[in-house]
Amino acid sequence: MAIKIDSTLTPQKLLPKLHRVFEVSAAKILSLQETWNPAKGTPVFTVAGHYTSRGWTEWTQGFQFGSALLQFDATGDDQFLELGRNKTIELMATHVSHIGVHDHGFNNVSTYGNLWRLMREGRIAANDRENDFYELALKVSGAVQAARWTTLPTGGYIYSFNGPHSLFIDTLRSLRSLAIAHQLGHVLMGERDRKISLLERLIQHAQATCHFNVYHGEGRDNYDVCGRTAHETIFNLNDGSYRCPSSQQGFSPFSTWTRGLAWAILGFAEQLEFLRIVPDAALSEACSKTKSAAEVRNCFLRGALATADFYLANACKDGVPMWDTGAPNLHRLGDYLGKASDPYNQWEPVDSSAAAIAAQGLVRLGNYLLGHQSVETGTLYRQAGLTVAATLLDTPYLSTRSSHQGLLLHSVYHRPNAWDHVPKGQKVPNGESSLWGDYHLRELALLLLREARGQSYLTFFNYPAGGQP
């Protein structure tokens, strides 16, 4: 294990850092809101400290306004509630009906989903019409996401923006949109009024991801190391057969892009939490075509454990990973896994956004296992997540300069396409932020802050008050 886990950390001990991150966060959100021109598209990442856009797909706007809602949740400052609510109503409708992307869980659960959650928690005033509006948006979003479907001989998957042959590991976290829509009693209507279960599609997509995008050390190819992930899996659409791994943002199909790895950890952990509130009869019916309910839960847990273990073995000592485990110049860094991460090294960038996503996944996985009497294993993952969080909530990762619009420094977007800013005098990207990195640092901090305060457990699906998955 490369990461050095601090077994003494608790959310309560992190309270000073958690308070500080939201103190710093407030000005960042307002600065972006004041300076950004929506006509430029969606802000994606910073260049020299200022947010800019990069057209690929519009997958980050929900993080912009969702960040304001997380800020309100943490601080109770109404200006951030109004910002998040007004901009969701004004600008997010096209994301609800967007048939061209696999990112509904990112855009719509971060906005409509957070507003719905806050109302159900009693954090904002109850309003039936407003609640119905949020629920309708979430129902439609889940159904539209589920409609991007490729059928396989043993199930199927939500295909990526690359087309029906492409299964992305990122999409695992967009299953949140299907989960909420199912929770609200919605179904996808198909040809001849066929009712398609959103829970069934959620389960089948997660199973396909676990089987094809996550390696389990079973000899699939010469690089089958347990817990390694492929960003993309390619299928032959003529017969649904598996063809090969691929990568859009990683170094190669046979190395591990660590943000994709992080999406898997968090995606599986969150869905394990969600499955705990699904009635046994509904779960059994939804998975009856492929596996039993117990086998489904075991599949999700298997994916979570494999990816979490691989992350812990391939992150630096402080819990922050390099952007890809096979990046070509890692050998020039010597024993980089035995040292704290160095975002200013001259050979390969780290990815703090992967760390923020993974940290939340590790904490949630640990909590889930602790709830299943797996005390030793659960404690291991939970403390690992807290260790990563402690690193990110401090320098050199927390952005404290008022002139920098980002919150989490040293995030990487698309290294192969050279989209990331390389500062003058440096050889690799560093010092910049991304909307997803900033959002997930806030979400991680909010999860821990609510626990430290003794508030209800933070979930996207509104776990019953006072309980914990």
Image (cartoon, rainbow, N blue to C red):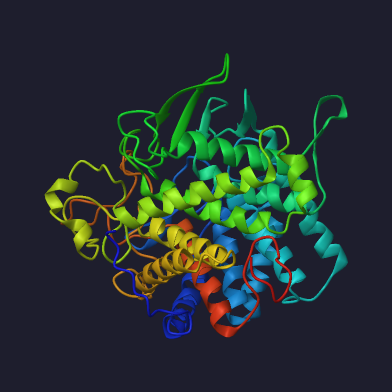
Q: Name the residue nearer the viewer: 113 or 241.
A: 241
Horizontally, residue 108 falls left or right of residue 318, namely right
**How far across and down, in percent of the image, does residue 161 sit?**
54, 34
Horizontally, residue 116 falls left or right of residue 362, namely right
Q: Quadrant of residue 142?
A: top right
Location of the N terminus by quadrant is bottom left
- In this picture, is 424 found above or below 95? below
**How far across and down, in percent of the image, does residue 101 sit?**
59, 38
Residue lying at 40% horizontally and 79% vertically, measured from the top left: 9
- In this picture, is 225 found above or below 117? above
Total number of numbered discs in the rendering: 0
Horizontally, residue 382 falls left or right of residue 206, namely left
**How far across and down, in percent of the image, does residue 405 sit?**
41, 67
Q: Name the residue nearer the viewer: 97 or 242.
A: 242
Location of the C terminus by quadrant is bottom right
* Res. 351 visible in picture: yes
**How far across and down, in percent of the image, does residue 133 sit?**
81, 57
Q: Quadrant of residue 66?
A: bottom right
* Res. 143 visible in picture: no
Residue lying at 52% horizontally and 41% vertically, measured from the top left: 57
Q: Name the residue nearer the viewer: 220 or 58.
A: 220
Residue lying at 43% horizontally and 49% vertically, measured from the top left: 307
